[in-house]
Amino acid sequence: MTSQPLPGGGAASPRWGLLHRRPRLRLGLLLGPPMLWLGVLYLGSLAALFITSLWTVDAFGGNIERVWNLDNYRDLFTIDVYRTITIRTLLIAVTVTVIDALLAFPIALYMAKVASPRLQRALVIAVLTPLWASYLVKAYAWRGMFASGGPLDDLGLSPGYGLTATVVTLSYLWLPYMILPMYAGLERLPDSLIEASADLGATTRTTMRRVVLPVLLPAAVAGSIFTFSLTLGDYIAVEIVGGANQMLGNVVYDSFLTGNNLPFAAAVATIPVVTMLVYLGAVRRTGALDSL
């Protein structure tokens, strides 16, 4: 077997020559490990989750009975408390996403189109800095803010522990995940388009509606995927600042650790997964994902 010549004039080893002659083998070796990881670890764990949700637990011995049925899903849809928790979780996720989008837009617009390059870099670091701190530290910091006798209580602004505190805390925690996609999207918007809109006599409102928002929409969708999905799966923040309220994550946690009912916990965990699949399907139909 002769060695393949390299572009630089040297001779390739037989192994590299084989990869050079067979691009499909080269592509398979390149994508094989990540696809194996995605298929086995990620999709495999999801399949295990759905299969487990179809099992039940022996009421007397507490052992898992591997007989397929829909009893867990029937309980989810027929017992009022679980319907209430599901609706509450979805409303909190939507509220957090809307609040983050409203807060992130002016910040991202200033960073991308107004701030000097030096200030722009400083603001990006400022947005990223909270991500370096522990989730628990930030959540407990907000618990201190909402506590009786805390800073907000002294100003008469503390809502106490409950749903409002949960929404505020989660909005703060996930805000960087909305700012950064919006900033990246607005940075790609050429300044010449905004200047041309102004030169043609468009008002600021018209420029925002017809120039900025069409570019911003895919970035906002990307950010909403993060904020919405992270809120759906969260259970720690509501434990810290939510008072007696619960979200779906708390039901999963309690069913698994306290109730020793893994199949029911798996059934509850499918709700955020299915919700996100429906959400991504709806977003895809709008064409927003094609512009990312």
Image (cartoon, helix red, strand yellow):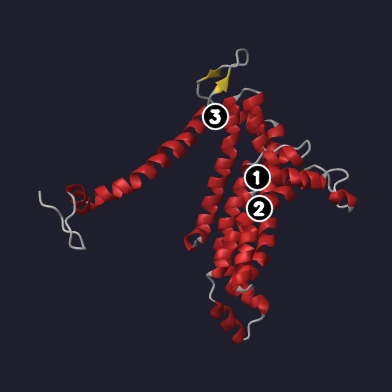
Q: Amino acid at mark 1?
A: Ser
Q: Which residue is mark 2?
A: 130
Q: Position of residue 286 (x, y in %)?
A: 53, 59
Residue 165 is labelled as: none
Number of marks in picture: 3
Residue 134 is labelled as: 1
Q: Position of residue 246 (x, y in %)?
A: 72, 37
Helix, strand or loop at label 2? It is helix
Q: At x 85% / y 47%, what residue is drawn?
A: 150
Q: At x 58% / y 74%, what residue is drawn?
A: 211
Q: Position of residue 182 (x, y in %)?
A: 59, 63
Q: At x 65% / y 41%, what residue is drawn?
A: 234
Residue 180 quadrant: bottom right
Q: Is 245 or 17 nearer to us in this picture?
A: 17
Q: Amino acid at mark 2?
A: Pro
Q: Would you call the spot at circle 2 few (<14 residues within 10 Å), some (14-19), or many (20 or more)?
A: some
Disc number lying in front (1 or 3): 1
Residue 223 in sight in this render: yes
Q: Do the CB atoms of the residues marked 1 and 3 lie less than 8 Å apart?
A: no
Q: Which residue is mark 3?
A: 53
Helix, strand or loop at label 1? It is loop
Residue extending farthest left: 1
Above or below, 189 against 230 in this view is below
Q: Position of residue 140 (x, y in %)?
A: 74, 43
Above or below, 216 against 54 in this view is below
Disc number lying in front (2 or 3): 2
Q: Would you call the spot at circle 3 few (<14 residues within 10 Å), some (14-19), or many (20 or more)?
A: many
Above or below, 80 against 23 in this view is above
Q: CA distance from mark 2 to mark 3?
A: 36 Å
